[in-house]
Image (cartoon, rainbow, N blue to C red):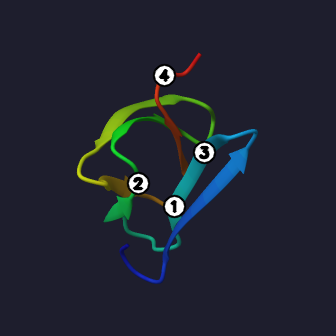
Amino acid sequence: MGSDDDYVLVFVKDGQRRIAAWTASANRQQVKVSLPNGQFNMIGIKGEDRGRVTSDQGVLSIQLAPAPVYLAPGELK
């Protein structure tokens, strides 16, 4: 991952995984996270759609900010 100021938490309920990621740093941080290959929906702290990102070769590159971003694998229903 990035620095000691960066956080990634994985939550699993009923077999569904959700990821929360943020940094405690005042500056945005670009980090690489080990995740299974596939697409992830990015959701902002207020539930807004932040687009999609793709994990390739088991690595997902995302930019962290002080406000958490939530990642949900696959299609949202």
In the rendered structure, find residue 22 and report the number of the disc placed on it: 1
Q: Is residue 55 visible?
A: yes
Three-letter code for the amino acid on which mark 1 is drawn: Trp
Q: Which residue is mark 3?
A: 18
Q: Going by the image, does 76 lie left or right of 59?
A: right
Q: Tell me whether the residue at label 4 lies in contact with that at label 1, contact meaning CB atoms closer than 8 angstroms.
A: no
Q: Tell me whether the residue at label 2 lies in contact with that at label 4, contact meaning CB atoms closer than 8 angstroms.
A: no
Q: Which residue is mark 2?
A: 35
Q: Exactly how many numbered labels are in the figure?
A: 4
Q: Is residue 67 visible?
A: no
Q: CA distance from mark 4 to mark 1?
A: 22 Å
Three-letter code for the amino acid on which mark 2 is drawn: Leu
Q: CA distance from mark 1 to mark 3?
A: 14 Å
Residue depth check, mark 2 versus mark 1: number of the one nearer the observer: 2
Instruction: Tell me the residue at 68%/40% (across/down).
Output: 15
Q: CA distance from mark 2 to mark 4?
A: 16 Å
Residue depth check, mark 4 versus mark 1: number of the one nearer the observer: 4
Q: Going by the image, does 31 lie left or right of 70?
A: left
Image location of residue 18, percent across then percent down: 60, 45
Q: Going by the image, does 23 lie left or right of 51?
A: right
Q: Is residue 19 above or below residue 46?
A: below
Q: Secondary structure at mark 1?
A: strand
Q: CA distance from mark 3 to mark 2?
A: 11 Å
Q: Indicate which disc, 4 or 3, sits on the residue closer to the N terminus.
A: 3
Instruction: Tell me the residue at 34%/55% (across/down).
Output: 63
